[in-house]
Amino acid sequence: MDDLYLHPDTFLMRLLGVFVVLTILPLVSQAETRFVEVEVTLRSGQGTEFEIVRMIRSGTPLEVLESNSRTGYSRVQMPGGTGGWVLTRYLTSNPVGAEQLVAARQTVDQLTRENRELTGERNRYMTEADNLAAELARLKDLSANALALEDSNQQFQARLKRADETIAKLEKDNARLSSTGNRDWFLAGGGVLVIGILLGVILPRLRWRRKRSWSDL
């Protein structure tokens, strides 16, 4: 009877011991499948100081073997047999949510690819825009040079016209001077001829008068 009787203090100590055991031994065997909510790290132990075994994509089904509420890790096994520890808070029992996460991740991947393609296309357009700007600048330079050449050509044509007018005037003046010179030469020649005739008439008479005067003596 004495063995069956427990002192209240002894009973409390045993009850406390059971509570402590339940507290310090939180490992509970699990036999359920859960899904990864977001991409999670599979480690060889319960903590970030342990080696990374691999990365597990969101939506992957895992068999939970045991969980440790104190460390926040669960020992899991992947469909291929690879085992390790993952953070329990990243596991969910709702496969629909996991599938939605997978779909969302696929959408993000697709948007990332589209964004990359759009970025490449934008860069191509920017390069083409730079090339067009350079070509436009070149055409503007050519246009400016063409306008300058046209202006120079117009000035040259004006100078050539003035030169032609000057040449025509000089030719006209030269013709007029040539006509005046011929006329002067004609008049001079006529005067010489008249003087010659007069001399031819007067000189013989003078000689005859001189002879006559000498004969009178």
Image (cartoon, grey):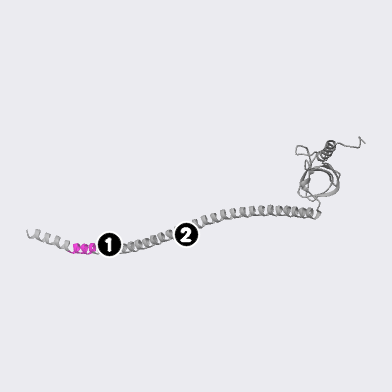
Identify residue type, mark 2: Glu
Identify residue type, mark 1: Trp
Q: Nearer the observer, disc 1 or disc 2?
A: 2
Of residues 102 and 217, the one drawn nearer to the viewer in this rendering: 102
Quarter residue 205 falls in: bottom left
- Tags 1 and 2 in contact by the CB under 8 Å rule? no
Residue bearing mark 2: 150
For the residue labelled by badge 1, is the local secondary structure a helix, a strand or a loop? helix
Residue bearing mark 1: 185
- The tag on residue 69 is none
As drawn, 194 above or below 88: below
Of residues 164 and 101, the one drawn nearer to the viewer in this rendering: 101
Q: Which stretch is magenta?
A: 191-201
Q: Which residue lies at the image location 47% right of the left edge and 59% below the top edge?
A: 150
**Residue at the top extreme, as displayed:** 2
Of residues 97 and 110, the one drawn nearer to the viewer in this rendering: 97
Q: Position of residue 110 (x, y in %)?
A: 73, 54
Q: If the image is split into quadrants, where does the N terminus sit? A: top right
**Can residue 55 be seen by looking at this rendering?**
no
> What is the crowding at mark 2: few (fewer than 14 residues within 10 Å), some, or many (at least 20)?
few
**Residue at the right extreme, as displayed:** 1
Q: Position of residue 98 (x, y in %)?
A: 79, 53
